[in-house]
Image (cartoon, grey):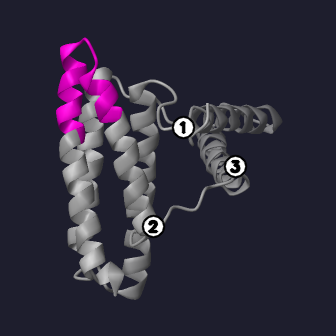
Amino acid sequence: MSDDDIFAGDVEGRLERLDRRVRAVVLDAQCRDWIAERPDRVGFARLGQVHHELRSAIRRYNAMRKAEDWVWPVLSTATWLVTTIVVLLVADDPVDPLTLAFALVAGLIAAQAAISAAGRVRRRVRPAPIEDPVLYADLTQRIEACAATARADSDEPGRAAAEDLGRALDWVSATRDEIIRGSSPAAR
């Protein structure tokens, strides 16, 4: 399924992709502004509200949040188990409390190293900067498409999700207007 088509997939899946994108933009903006020591709390708060409204709409479709990525828990658990078992098999006295503690700690360290190595290998899409006007146009278009589908939904939770998405649109436009006016430190 392509992310280019704003009507591709179910509403919940499209909202999940939008939510991940909004969180990535907020995190990127926060990191850049903290490094520059010029925090933009209003812009972050508004985009945080967009995230909150998107989460509310997603919960109306499915109260149980989907796991974003199941590879990390499986990788870390498998690495931890294999490392611990190998250390205990190689040890002279595997029932010794000190040996057991060493095996468990070595497993945890190996699991964290595996997660870190896999994170470096995995390709990440660079989020759009918070001051990019194209970002807000795209977010608006995608949220409106989800809201239109939600309004046409036969279930009450779907129609209620359209109200949450309307509030998310208000927050997106408020953030966009602040960036365009130049009153936000992110635009300076």
Q: Majority secondary structure of the magenta segment?
A: helix
Instruction: Please state if 118 lies on the left or on the right of 128 as rendered.
Output: right
Whole-percent x, y for residue 120 in the image: 69, 57
Q: Amino acid at mark 1?
A: Asp
Q: Was residue 148 drawn as part of the magenta stretch in this picture?
A: yes
Name the secondary structure under disc 3: helix
Residue 104 drawn above or below residue 59? below
Q: CA distance from mark 3 to mark 1?
A: 29 Å
Give the x, y percent position of residue 32. 44, 77
Q: Earlier in the sequence, mark 2 or mark 1?
A: 1
Residue 63 visible in rendering? no
Which mark, residue 28?
2
Taking the spot 34% from the left edge, 42% from the top edge, the residue there is: 143
Residue drawn at (45%, 67%) of the image: 28
Name the side, left or right, on which 163 lies relative to 36.
left
Hey, which residue is sitting farthest right in the picture? 90
Question: From what the image shows, is residue 49 above or below residue 77?
Answer: below
Q: Are marks 2 and 1 in contact (CB under 8 Å)?
A: no
- The residue under label 1 is 5
The mark lying in front, picked from 2 and 1, is: 1
Instruction: Find numbered disc 2 in the image and state the secondary structure of the residue it sits on.
Output: helix
Which residues lie in the magenta part?
146-165
- Judge depth for marks 3 and 2 and give the one in front: 2
Alpha carbon distance from label 2 to label 1: 25 Å
Where does label 3 land, which residue?
118
Local crowd size for mark 2, using a 10 Å CA cut-off: few (<14), some (14–19), many (≥20): some
Q: Earlier in the sequence, mark 3 or mark 2?
A: 2
